Image: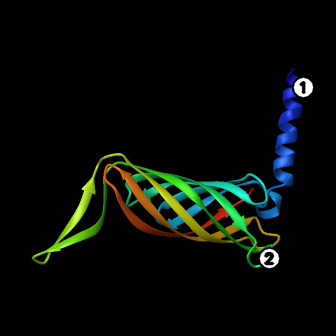
Amino acid sequence: MRRVLIFLTLVIVLVGNLYSQGPRGKSFGFGIILGEPTGLTGKLWLNRENAIDFSVGSSYFGALRFTGDYLWHFDSFDSQVVKLYAGPGLAIGTGESGGWIYKKKDDEYWYRKSDDLGIGVRGLFGLNIIPKRSPLEIFVELGVLVGLTPRTGASGEAAIGIRFYP
């Protein structure tokens, strides 16, 4: 039984790397993301077209924010270096948040603050650059976040980042 488990694990790892689209055929990378959110990021390629990315960092949505997205990659430029991607995701913000100035009354600006758990869904569109013979992935993304709790609302998001594939 132990040999069967070892064999299956090796097959899964080898097949995952065979069909991955990350730099140098790797399926997992990690790095930094700046913007909304700002923090650490990771990406797991499931096959040549699909991946799951995630991030942990600070954001308007919460002092600590966790995001996860399911991505489809498109070969819009007929290039192995530059690709577009899009997909849905989920964001969970914890801790005190403060952000948008949302109202002006008698030259006074109101600032939203809350320490509630925030949950929202997001839609993402991005550009992926994977230089040949490099272990790096550079990305730029735009999206929209729709807050579901504690209050509803929407905001735009933009980020840039880099991931390293060991």
Q: Residue at x 86, y 31 (%)?
A: 6
Residue 68, how many percent across, how many down? 56, 52
**Residue at 65% across / 59% down in the picture?**
71
- The 10 Å Cα crowd at callout 2, few under 14, some 14 to 19, many 20 or more, is few
Residue, x 84% and y 28% (percent of image)? Answer: 5
Marks 1/2: CA distance? 41 Å
Q: Which mark is residue 3?
A: 1
In which quadrant will I find the N terminus?
top right
Snapshot quadrant of residue 130? bottom right
Q: Nearer the viewer, residue 72 or 45?
A: 72
Instruction: Say which quadrant the C terminus sits in.
Output: bottom right
Q: Amino acid at mark 2?
A: Ser
Q: Circle 1 sits in a helix, a strand or a loop, which is it?
A: helix
Q: Is residue 119 above or below residue 82?
A: above
Along the viewing direction, whichever of 30 and 124 lies nearer the viewer? 124
Percent position (x, y) of residue 160?
56, 70
Instruction: Pinpoint residue 122: horizontal percent, then vertical percent.
Output: 49, 59
Number of dots carrying numbers? 2
Which residue in the structure is indicated by mark 2? 79
Q: Amino acid at mark 1?
A: Arg
The residue at the far top in this view is 1
Tell me the tag on residue 143: none
Q: Position of residue 103 (x, y in %)?
A: 21, 71
Instruction: Report helix, strand or loop for mark 2.
Output: loop
